[in-house]
Image (spheres, rainbow, N blue to C red):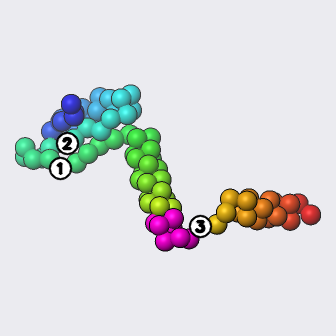
Amino acid sequence: MPTIKSSTELRNNYNEISIFCNQTQEPVFITKNGQGDLAVMSIETYEKLVGRLELYHLLQEGEQAITAGKTHPFEQVFQELRNEVIGDKQ
C-alpha cells in the first residue's frame, strides 16, 4: 500500500520521511489540499528507476532492429570487437 503524506507533514517531518524513503526504497506520495501532488523518493531509488527505463528503451530498440532485419551474425560482431581490442594494444 502506498505511503501518502500531506505537504504539511513533509514540511514538519522531513527527516522522518527521508529516513523512510532511504530505508524502504519506496516513494512517499505527497498531497496538496487533499490532491496528489508529488512523489518523493531517495536518490538511489530514482537512479534505479531511471536505469530501468533506459534499459527498457534499449531493449525496445533491439527488438525493433531485429524486426527490421538489422542484425549481424554473432561471430562477425565478436571478431570485429576482438580486432578493435587487439588493434588498440598494438
Which residue lies under the disc numbered 2?
30
Q: Amino acid at mark 2?
A: Ile
Q: Where residue 76 sits: x, y (%)? A: 73, 64
Seen in the picture, residue 9 relative to 79 is either above or below; the reply is: above
Write the residue at 68% across / 59% down.
74
Asked if marks 2 and 1 touch (Cβ < 8 Å), the reply is yes
Write the residue at 22% across / 48% down.
38
User: Quadrant of the rendered structure where residue 20 is?
Assistant: top left
The secondary element bearing badge 1 is classed as strand
Q: Is residue 57 left or right of residue 70?
A: left
Which residue lies under the disc numbered 1?
37
Write the residue at 47% across / 61% down.
63
Which residue lies under the disc numbered 3?
71
Among the two numbered marks 2 and 1 on one chain, the one whose residue lies closer to the N terminus = 2
- What span is in magenta? 64-71
How far is disc 2 from disc 1 in space, using C-alphas?
A: 6 Å
Q: Amino acid at mark 3?
A: Thr
Q: Where residue 57 sits: x, y (%)? A: 44, 59
How far is disc 1 from disc 3 in space, using C-alphas?
A: 45 Å
User: How crowded is the residue under tag 2: few (<14 C-alpha within 10 Å), some, or many (20+)?
Assistant: many
Farthest residue, direction right: 90
The secondary element bearing badge 3 is classed as loop
Q: Is residue 70 magenta?
A: yes
Among the two numbered marks 1 and 3 on one chain, the one whose residue lies closer to the N terminus = 1
As rendered, which of 90 and 46 lies closer to the eye?
A: 90
